[in-house]
Image: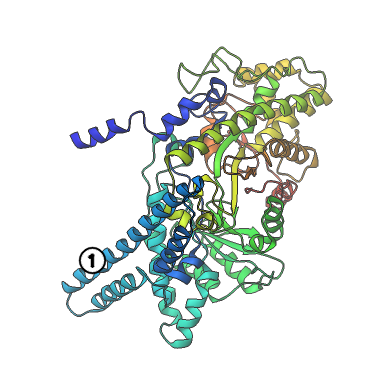
């Protein structure tokens, strides 16, 4: 216990969180998870970035030994009279250290497997242990020759990435594509059968449950748990030439989930206009099992979104899914997906209350240091009590959004710079294109693509809140702006008829294929995207907006008072791009087809970090 306490004390004043907090201004700090929770920075303030896929094809082609030779060649070619090259030499030395460590890691497992085999009498388990030992020994330096060897190397390399990055959503990418050459070769040579490879895939899924992560309390709350999470595996889609890429492994990965029925990996299936009907049926049947998997991605939206972000056509066609819904050029990108979650529902609240929290001073779920209690949190942009037109509401929302995205981006950039200074990632750099070629760590901008992807949360809450204001205050004049604000201030107590009306189908609601409300949802999301997209980041890349919440809508709802969409205080804001659900009931009442049509009206191509 004393040793642990000594270790804890040595970290005081030296953590990433403390460095980030020390660099923030009061304006930046007041809106973060450190105070009033307009936007959350907790994921990368308290942990690593993750949200990536390594270049497994490079690893399989060269092995650790071949990659070491490349690094040594790059280091020996440096002109050390050039100051920048001294930094590059240190970077290459770090890469060699982690490559040697990765090889040693595999050799230790080989030795352990042999030691365990010696204690087992002749049995299938003894043979399996010896096979594991042979696999680990070989791939400790050499490229894999079989499906089993490739799988062993894949799992161990990903484990190292998880240890080094301390991030989640370290994903396996297009497994059915990069593993297919090994599958085909083993089947053709008789080295393995389809059944034996099916078993290996299912064992991989089970082994992924072993990956876990201890998180801080302030990350567990908005992110619903302590598990690793986000270890996505993508199948289907098109190849780099645009042709259907479905193969045997595509179906086998789906079968593996149907057989194991566990939460890992987070399975994603890419669909396009030429996806085989058999794959569509297989996907639907697996979804029917009821585990919530797989998720389906539309190539006809994802590929244009990737192109819009600046990736090449080949890399866009070869996209894979990271974590939840993020598009990524696997092995070439450091995307900083989920860099922040901003509550656009909170931004709308500030927009209709002159920059002050509704319920300010009456209740706060944070603490007495909150920058908002008794004060104005955002800029003065007018109040619904004084607005004379709905256009003023939209203008105020736009101004508040500009202010809060400015603060959010400043906070993210501080985090990015601190990660560069304190947390270089040489092993990930080895397996990310252009880092070794350029002699630059992945955290410092060495990757081919460098994006930052913060997410907007609460689009449905904003849409329905705007619809209520537009319809009831300015068009039908059934209630004044002051009365609607008072109803929210009082958490709808004493305003029960108005509460019932706002939550009824007599008011336009997003999610019902109703252009009145759906158009407002699009405005809410587009305004966010407009103020985020294409901003420069600290790694020489740019920002890509996303519109989804995971489970952050619950945490962000806990720090927001009642809102004009019919929410009561502390209820979750709307989930991802879904409709509003309050204690009174769900606002989408016209069925799933209408919901899909409403969602389709959002600009998913513009929200290039995912929806």
Q: How many marks?
A: 1
Residue position marked by numbered label 1 in the rendering: 112
Q: Is residue 314 visible?
A: yes
Q: Residue at x 72, y 56 (%)?
A: 304
Q: Position of residue 347 (x, y in %)?
A: 65, 28
Snapshot colouring: rainbow
Q: Nearer the viewer, residue 30 or 524?
A: 30
Neighbor class of circle 1 (other Cα within 10 Å; few <14, some 14-19, many 20+) is some
- Horizontal side, residue 404 vs residue 522: left or right: left
In the rendered view, tell whether residue 75 sits above or below residue 380. below
Which of the image's four quarters has the N terminus? top left
Q: Nearer the viewer, residue 276 or 112?
A: 112
In the rendered view, tell whether residue 389 sits above or below residue 141. above
In the rendered view, tell whether residue 426 sits above or below residue 33. below
Q: Residue at x 60, y 25 (%)?
A: 562
Q: Position of residue 397 (x, y in %)?
A: 72, 27
Which residue lies most toward the front here? 81
Q: Nearer the viewer, residue 502 or 421?
A: 421
Q: Position of residue 605 (x, y in %)?
A: 71, 50
Q: Is residue 476 visible?
A: no
Residue 532 image-quadrant placement: top right
Q: Residue at x 42, y 29 (%)?
A: 18
Which residue lies most toward the bottom here? 189
- Horizontal side, residue 475 vs residue 242: left or right: right
Judging from the image, what secondary structure is the residue with disc 1 in? helix
- Horizontal side, residue 394 vs residue 40: left or right: right
């Amino acid at each position: 216990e004393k040793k642990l306490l000594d270790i804890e004390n040595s970290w005081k004043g030296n953590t990433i969180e403390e460095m980030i907090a020390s660099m923030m201004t009061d304006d930046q700090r007041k809106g973060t998870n450190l105070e009033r929770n307009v936007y959350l920075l907790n994921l990368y303030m308290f942990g690593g970035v993750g949200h990536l896929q390594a270049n497994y094809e490079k690893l399989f082609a060269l092995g650790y030994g071949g990659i070491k030779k490349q690094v040594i060649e790059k280091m020996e070619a440096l002109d050390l009279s050039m100051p920048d090259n001294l930094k590059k030499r240190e970077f290459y030395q770090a890469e060699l250290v982690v490559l040697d460590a990765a090889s040693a890691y595999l050799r230790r497992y080989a030795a352990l497997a042999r030691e365990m085999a010696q204690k087992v009498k002749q049995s299938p388990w003894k043979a399996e242990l010896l096979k594991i030992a042979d696999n680990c020994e070989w791939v400790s330096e050499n490229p894999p020759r079989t499906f089993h060897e490739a799988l062993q190397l894949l799992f161990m390399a990903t484990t190292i990435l998880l240890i080094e990055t301390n991030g989640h959503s370290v994903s396996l990418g297009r497994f059915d594509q990069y593993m297919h050459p090994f599958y085909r070769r083993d089947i053709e040579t008789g080295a393995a059968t389809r059944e034996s490879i099916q078993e290996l895939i299912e064992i991989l899924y089970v082994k992924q449950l072993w990956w876990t992560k201890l998180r801080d309390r302030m990350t567990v709350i908005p992110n619903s748990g302590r598990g690793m999470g986000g270890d996505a595996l993508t199948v289907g889609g098109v190849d780099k030439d645009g042709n259907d890429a479905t193969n045997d492994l595509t179906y086998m990965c789906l079968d593996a989930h149907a057989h194991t029925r566990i939460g890992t990996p987070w399975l994603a299936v890419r669909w396009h206009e030429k996806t085989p009907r058999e794959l569509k049926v297989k996907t639907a049947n697996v979804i029917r099992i009821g585990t919530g998997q797989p998720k389906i991605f539309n190539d006809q939206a994802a590929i244009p979104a990737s192109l819009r972000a600046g990736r090449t056509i080949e890399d866009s066609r070869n996209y894979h899914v990271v974590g939840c819904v993020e598009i990524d050029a696997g092995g070439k990108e450091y995307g900083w997906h989920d860099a922040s979650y901003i509550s656009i529902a909170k931004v709308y609240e500030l927009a209709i209350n002159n920059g002050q929290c509704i319920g300010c001073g009456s209740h706060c779920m944070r603490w007495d240091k909150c920058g908002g209690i008794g004060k104005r949190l955002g800029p003065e942009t007018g109040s619904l009590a004084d607005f004379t037109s709905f256009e003023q509401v939209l203008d105020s929302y736009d101004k508040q959004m500009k202010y809060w995205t400015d603060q959010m981006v400043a906070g993210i950039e501080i985090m990015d710079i601190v990660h560069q200074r304190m947390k270089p990632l040489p092993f990930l750099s080895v397996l990310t294109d252009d880092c070794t070629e350029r002699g630059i760590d992945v955290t410092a901008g060495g990757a081919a693509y460098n994006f930052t992807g913060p997410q907007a949360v609460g689009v449905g809450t904003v849409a329905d809140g705007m619809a209520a204001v537009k319809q009831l205050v300015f068009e039908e004049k059934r209630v004044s702006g002051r009365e609607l604000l008072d109803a929210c201030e009082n958490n709808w107590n004493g305003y029960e008829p108005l509460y019932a009306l706002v939550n009824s189908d007599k008011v336009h609601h997003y999610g019902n294929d109703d252009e009145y409300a759906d158009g407002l949802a699009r405005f809410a999301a587009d305004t966010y995207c407009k103020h985020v997209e294409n901003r420069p980041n600290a790694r020489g890349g740019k920002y890509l907006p996303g519109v989804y919440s995971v489970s952050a809508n619950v945490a962000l709802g806990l720090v927001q008072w009642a809102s004009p969409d019919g929410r009561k205080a502390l209820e979750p804001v709307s989930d991802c791009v879904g409709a509003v659900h309050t204690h009174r009931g769900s606002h989408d009442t016209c069925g799933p087809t209408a919901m899909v049509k409403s969602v389709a009206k959002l600009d998913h191509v513009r929200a290039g970090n995912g929806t």
